[in-house]
Amino acid sequence: MSDFPVHGATAPGFERVRDVFERNFTGDIEVGASFAVVVAGETVVDLWGGYQDRECTRPWNADTLVNVYSTTKGVASAALATAVEDGALDYEAPVRDYWPEFRAGANGLTVGQFLSHQSGVCGLRDRVTVPDLYDWPRMTARIAAEAPHWEPGTAAGYHAILWGFLAGELALRTTGKSLGQLVRERIAGPLDADFHIGLPDSEHDRVAHLIGPNHARRQPDPATLLGVRMPPLFRYALQNPSIRPWGDACTAPWRRAEIAAANGHGNARGIARIYGALADGERVLERRTIAAMTVEEWGMADDLVLGRPMRRGRGINLNTDGQYGRNPGAFGHNGAGGSIGFADPERRLGIGYAMNQMQPGIEADTRGNRLVRTVFECL
């Protein structure tokens, strides 16, 4: 038996995907992971393997869940789009129509701009702790009162954590439901997709432990990190607070919370089912709603937090630099450490990848990217 046993199946023609998945364990740093592909409504790849913990004592099972960080944003965007479809929310309307207390929306910032990281409130200036994130009324009041870091609507800067409160507050104010409820009722539930924002205690036992990049079996060449300097706003957006993979994101309060920017729990099968449905259209969202969600609100100009370009729709990321294949109309969202979820409507394709060993360094040749490239080679 391999030190990292792999389970699952691939349809004829996709055998090479399993080979790459296995090599991610034997030749790279994978500890536990799942990978799934849906084409035209049919699952053609459904793989899982390795272990749920750093010590490699708990096997990764078919139904193992893991925190997928910002891959959550794509699923949450689809859930919020149900409010648009129902007529409760308009992407073109000013945010102040729904959230008049939101200071950065005073001059007409639209919902579309707001969801595409243009509000200027990428992070708070005053100190935020991880427990602060569990107090929804207090956090949304602080966010509403914050002065923007730039003129809203004139630039984009990644709202790494606060996006979940922005989108979540819109959901509450327009539907009376949280984004976690909307995901359950309108997206994951109808598709029997194992994906959760706000995980019930009864499901915590099947969640894999996240493993920080500093604990990877192999560390990146220090030369690959030389010269990396993040823009000044990075510290507000991603380090206030700093969320520790083990110390914070593996705790019960984090799993219970509904922070739709960063704490979705799912597996590759659930993510691929959701994106496969979005690629097909008409299953959980009408095609016109998906088209509205994927309107480009921000193009190829540098993000003020990340320091590089990222095409953005209304909460969803649009294909940038071929990360989701050759189709510029592909859309999805990646998460810190390496998780991936995206749809390619041209190929009726949905892909999901979830793992517990977070990627160290800034290497372009990641485990997830290798799997995605191999899928396109097999199509």
Image (tube, rainbow, N blue to C red):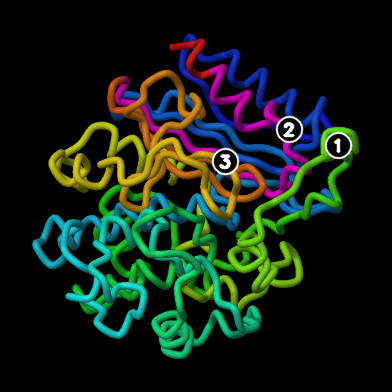
- Of the image marks 2 and 3, the number of the one nearer the N terminus: 3
- Residues at marks 1 and 2 touching, judged by CB atoms closer than 8 Å: yes
Q: In which quarter of the image is residue 241?
A: bottom right
Q: Which of 117 and 229 is in front in this view?
A: 229
Quadrant of the drawing holding the C terminus: top left
Q: Could you tell me residue 360's position as x and y percent?
A: 78, 43
Q: Can residue 170 be seen in this view?
A: yes
At horizontal 31% and vertical 51% (from top left) the residue drawn is: 314
* Picture layout, residue 326 above or below residue 250: above
- Residues at marks 1 and 3 touching, judged by CB atoms closer than 8 Å: no
Q: Which of 361 and 125 is in front in this view?
A: 125
The answer for how far apart the CA atoms under marks 1 and 2 are is: 8 Å
Q: Could you tell me residue 110's position as x and y percent?
A: 24, 62
Q: Mark 2 points at which residue?
A: 363
- Is residue 371 shown in magenta? yes
The answer for how far apart the CA atoms under marks 2 and 3 are is: 15 Å
Q: In which quarter of the image is residue 217?
A: top right
Q: What label does residue 103 carry, if any?
A: none
Q: What residue type is labelled 2?
A: Glu
Q: Which amino acid does label 1 sit on?
A: Pro
* Picture layout, residue 9 above or below residue 85: above
Q: What residue type is labelled 3?
A: Arg
Q: Name the residue under label 1.
A: 220
The answer for how far apart the CA atoms under marks 1 and 3 are is: 21 Å
At horizontal 52% and vertical 72% (from top left) the residue drawn is: 202
Q: Nearer the viewer, residue 84 or 151?
A: 151
Q: Could you tell me residue 40's position as x and y percent?
A: 29, 25
Say which element carries label 1: loop
Of labels 2 and 3, the one closer to you: 3
Magenta-colored span: 347-374
At horizontal 46% and vertical 22% (from top left) the residue drawn is: 325
